[in-house]
Image: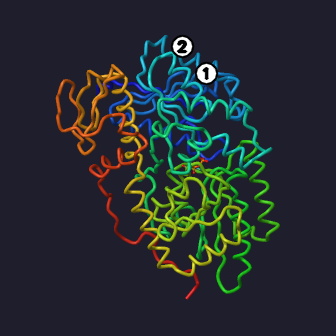
Amino acid sequence: MDRQWRVAMISEHASPAALLGGEDAGGQNVYVDAVSRGLASRGYAVDIFTRRDDPEAPLVMEWGPGVRIVNVTAGPARHLPKDGLWRYMPTFRDSCMDFAERYDVRYHVLHGNFWMSGWVLTELQRVWGIPGVQLFHATGKTKQRHQGKADTSPSDRIRTEMEIVRQASAVITQCPTERDEMIGDYGADPAKIAFIPGAVNTEIFRPLDRAKARQAIGLDAAGPVIVYVGRILPRKDVANILHALARLARQPDRPCPTLLVVGGGEGAESVREMARLRELAGTLEIAERVRFVGQHQPATLRDYYCAGDIAVTTPWYEPFGLTPLEAMACGRPVVGSAVGGLLYTIVPGQTGLLVPPRDPVALAAALGDLFTHPVLLKRMGRAGLERVQQGFTWAHVAQRTDHLFRWLLASQGEAMSLPWRVHGLPGMADRNVRPTVGSEDRHAFLPGSEDRHSCLSLPDLNIADPMLFEHVDRNSHTPLGLDGDLLGDIDYGVH
Ligand code: UDP
């Protein structure tokens, strides 16, 4: 494949090669991996720049067709907590520039992830004169609001984020809450915000009969099971789930669910939190109902989701949250806290339920209700799967990101084809004369072609408009099909 367009994907602490589920390895690692592969499958060459944290790691790793991981030197070549990385970012930037120069690589577009990479993005955007797209994954202001004094972020964080929002060519937001935060907290220009929700790998995360899944993970529990998957950090508030479980355990008229807690790892914060949770389970006298199974990689995670009847996640805040989508892709309803991305991915009453954060009473009531309605549970599982297939696959994300890149590159005067009918390209380099775009048409732009049917001018075509992406998706969506019973037979002991 002739890969004409090169993307520099910057992700200073989150490498796709990391083991998932540890303290600093979660959603961002998954995102960077999946979007890079997706862009490569659409013809881009993608280099993922990440910080070398292992002296044995090669400078360049071939990661997949069209995707390389570039382990650049920035600080000591060992794992460091991400809040300690800020001081190494100037070196990180210089190492990216050295690499491009030494190997004579010209990049066309930058994709920054998290705020420190966002700073590198603004630097490289300026030096290389190319567009840059930023996705924060989490923001300093939200963290401050929820964690207060416990927030260990460098003091420069919020000021730097403000500057990134001002300078990046476009900012990707993954849910309406994040968009509101970008505009309200960071004064982002709404016309610069693209709306591209995160996604799930529907080839890995698929429904599996509950009994088979339990057998696969060696779970002997016969009754109801709830599952938490994610990093083990205070803000994920697994303690809230334990408190809810303790309430359910006190109800004599129905069986108490077993809770599977998937995640953990070696980081100090994660180890501390895990110890606290184990102790709490003992204090609440539910230790025998809780299985802490440690971190697992995606191939086995499917079995854990499918071994459960309901997935539960009740963080204090959640910028987006991939795990609810993974559970939905496995045909499992999700009970989540009514915050951030969960407000967008979970449709209450249809694909699961939303409860207030830090409210074990509400969580216990929601779980208790669901377990008394097995038919509703099944229906929600199906609805979740359909929701995921309709708009939350990585193919959708790659397509939308590709369109955003094309839009930016064409605006810069690159001879890039657009998925919409366009004319007036020669004017693109000249900022005073804009091309016009037919929003109802997906014909690729061919340089030199003249199309008179255009109806919108580029400045009117706001990248923040979900329709820009939606109408393309509707044309290309192929449902994966849904048949059979997702859960298998369930007996919750409630008749
Ligand atoms: N994850 C994993 N193994 C684990 C725990 C979590 O692979 O033991 C993955 C999980 O499947 C999801 C990601 O880590 O893809 C967590 O992403 P999410 O957006 O839910 O939370 P974040 O880590 O970004 O806070």
Mark 1 and 2 residues: CB-CB less than 8 Å, in contact?
A: no
Q: Which type of secondary structure does the marked residue at label 2 adopt?
A: helix
Amino acid type shown at disc 1: Phe
* x then y, percent, for residue 186: 60, 38
User: Is residue 231 left or right of 68 when viewed as pictured?
Assistant: right
Locate the C terminus by quadrant: bottom right
* Residue drawn where x is 35% and y is 49% of the image: 470
* Residue drawn where x is 53% and y is 15% of the image: 97
Label 1 crowding class (10 Å Cα cut-off): few <14, some 14-19, many 20+? Answer: many
- Mark 1 vs 2, N-terminal side: 1
Nearer-the-camera pick, 404 or 276: 404
* Residue drawn where x is 32% and y is 62% of the image: 481
User: Is residue 411 left or right of 244 when viewed as pictured?
Assistant: left
Nearer-the-camera pick, 284 or 467: 467
Nearer-the-camera pick, 375 or 336: 336
Label 2 crowding class (10 Å Cα cut-off): few <14, some 14-19, many 20+? Answer: few
Residue 98, numbered circle = 2
Locate the N terminus by quadrant: top left
* Ligand 1 has an atom within 8 Å of the beta carbon of the residue at disc 2: no
Answer above or below: position of 407 versus 480: above
Q: Which type of secondary structure does the marked residue at label 1 adopt?
A: helix
* x then y, percent, for residue 69: 50, 28
Answer above or below: position of 221 versus 314: below
* x then y, percent, for residue 10: 53, 29
Cα separation between marks 1 and 2 = 10 Å
User: Is residue 244 left or right of 206 when viewed as pictured?
Assistant: right
User: Which of the 4 quarters of the picture holds residue 358?
Assistant: bottom right
The residue that mark 1 highlights is: 92
